[in-house]
Image: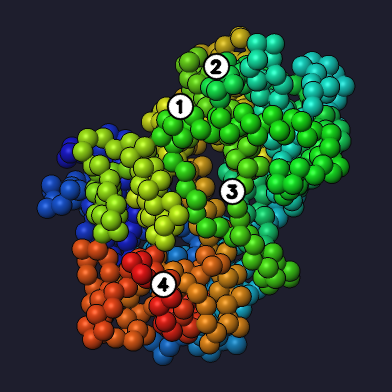
Amino acid sequence: MSSKKLEGKIERHEKGYGFFIPDRDDLEDIFIPPGRLRSAITGDRVLVRYTASGRGKNPVGEVLSVLERDVKKIVGTLRISRDGSVVIPDSVRLGRTVRVPDQSGSSRVQDGDLVEVEIENYQPLEGVIIDVLGERGDPKSEEKLLLKKYGLNPDFPVEVEKEAEKLSDRPQPETIQARTDLRDLEVLTIDPVDAKDLDDAVSVNVTGGGNFRIGVHITDVSHYIKEGSNLDAEARRRATSTYLADRVIPMFPKSFSNGIGSLGGETERLVLSVFLIVKPSGKVIEYEFEESVIDVDACLSYQQVDAYLDTGEVKPPLDRVADSIDTMVTISHRMRARRMDRGSLNFDLPEVRLECHEGEVKEIIPVEHTLSHQLIEEFMIAANEAVARYLTNRNIPMLYRVHEPPPEEDVEAFARFVQGLGYSVDTEGDISPADFQRVLDQAEGEREEKVISWNMLRSLSKARYSPKNFGHFGLASECYCHFTSPIRRYPDLVIHRLLKEVIDGSGMSDSKRNSWSKRLPELAEYTTEMEINATDAERESVDVKLLQHMEDAVGEEREVYITSIMGFGCFAQLENTLEGLLHVSSLNDYYVYNESDFSLIGERTGHVLRIGDRLRVKIARVDIPSRELDFELVEVLEDKNG
């Protein structure tokens, strides 16, 4: 490790220490002990000096100065006392409370209120209350908190809305004339039943040689959204659409994303088409690209397609494209089999969709990964790979979607975990996705299948965007990008712009190549951060709604299965995917934790609780502010070895 001063970002832990992440990829993270962070908080750009090699695996350093602040406002819970007022941040990013001017004599706020604070001083950490969101635990207040916490704004700036409204409802005749005309091609969309922003359509033909010509047609957002426009700047700032439990915070105004930017409706739409030539075995042997115009024949839902595949009953509008669906299912099944053979991971994790009305959960619907989902998934993955290979082979600067192999220590931890459940992972040499998939295959249908899937997912590296190609471990893909959702992901829009530079064969100019090469690293980092932010918001949104839904169930009994076990108790999951804690004090014996196989053993009864066991529990406590759910054990319904 160089002794020179380094620039980068801080990740501060709530216990007072932190880690410095250098700008340079070839340098390892530096541990910053408590007391040496100065006023730096998570996300701040700082100047750090390396001071020692450290006893652990990370070198040790100290923050010299903060170069740029990341967090300027926070939301949290106000606590008023005789010693003054503080706000406890709802996010752990600050790692400490924020002092605010004394509120004890004010009728505007009360102890326990949710508030927004603008930070005025970072050492000591002080701020001023700029907004009162309401009472902690109130559904409307919690919704405001979520939007503020994650920086989500359902409204667009006036100039952005006006720019979107100026776009025409139909493509111009001269634009259509300059494109490949595919309006006679049978094209269909398959999406969730309530989707409005339809950005992908598919088609299929059988070629003269017996191969299949799969068409993946993606709405040409880049034709309408020009670099430097207000729409583009706002889309880049948002970076992604965020799908909360009961609403969508879109990347583009609905007048565009649900209008001319969407492939819904019986009218011409501009698209970028990827044509995949696929052998009957499911192997993609060729691909080509076109700027084209299509006219969608049928906008279908997953439910409609699945109903047809289950019953064979043909109902409008599916009757127009039934033969195409049959062909697509056949070839997508073979493509999927080839992807599984190369080692691609196949997680089947429980997921729910919430039907809400006026903010309240009315129905909890399990999400199934059906044949119709798999059909679309296979075609989209193949199109993404084709675009990534095409641009890479032409040495075009790229924004890859990468998923690196998991760190060695995480692989070893997962191997120890599954060994306690009676499974094994070969940790000799480099780990491959096929090594992980073998465990999933062995656990299929067993009680611990879901638990193993969850823990495997946690052990894997996080997928991210990068200007460098590190491959995609989870998909067992050597070259991958995101191309198929430019309405809801900004990286896809970037890939569209890069592809349109070269699909006519003219190549990219040196000036544009240099420009993209300089811009992509920062864009990759930012869009990755915003994706993580959206994912965290989506998960918390669902958890809050489910906790609110469970408030009326306190005292009732439910069935759960154990997902993890620790010394203080075990976590168990309800059918609706919400997890709760069974503390050892709520059990019917004094239980001792056995670390070797992640079990709890009752001293008096000798009964063993293991991961995967099914239990009947009573809902003991629902705490929305802390996002906590507590259970009490009623009985063991089925243990893992029972």
Which is nearer the N-term, disc 2 or disc 4?
A: 2
Which is nearer the N-term, disc 1 or disc 2?
A: 2
**x 43%, y 84%: residue:** 634
**x 71%, y 25%: residue:** 204
Q: Which residue is mark 3?
A: 369
Q: CA distance from mark 2 to mark 3?
A: 27 Å
Q: Quadrant of residue 28?
A: top left
Q: Which quadrant would the C terminus be assigned to in this image?
A: bottom left
Relative vertical location of residue 412 with respect to residue 602 in this rendering, above or below: above
Q: Position of residue 254 (x, y in %)?
A: 76, 47
Q: CA distance from mark 2 to mark 4?
A: 50 Å
Q: Position of residue 598 (x, y in %)?
A: 27, 65
Q: Residues within 10 Å of mark 1 (few under 14, many from 20)?
A: many
Q: What secondary structure is marked by label 4? A: strand
Relative vertical location of residue 151 with respect to residue 409 in this rendering, above or below: below
Which is nearer the N-term, disc 4 or disc 3?
A: 3
Between label 2 and label 4, give the one nearer the viewer.
Answer: 4
Q: Which residue is mark 2?
A: 285
Q: Which residue is mark 1?
A: 479
Q: Quadrant of residue 234?
A: top right
Mark 4: amino acid: Glu
Q: CA distance from mark 3 to mark 1?
A: 25 Å
Contact (Cβ within 8 Å) of mark 4 with mark 3 = no
| Label tally | 4
Q: Residues within 10 Å of mark 3 (few under 14, many from 20)?
A: some
Q: Which residue is mark 4?
A: 638
Mark 2: amino acid: Ile
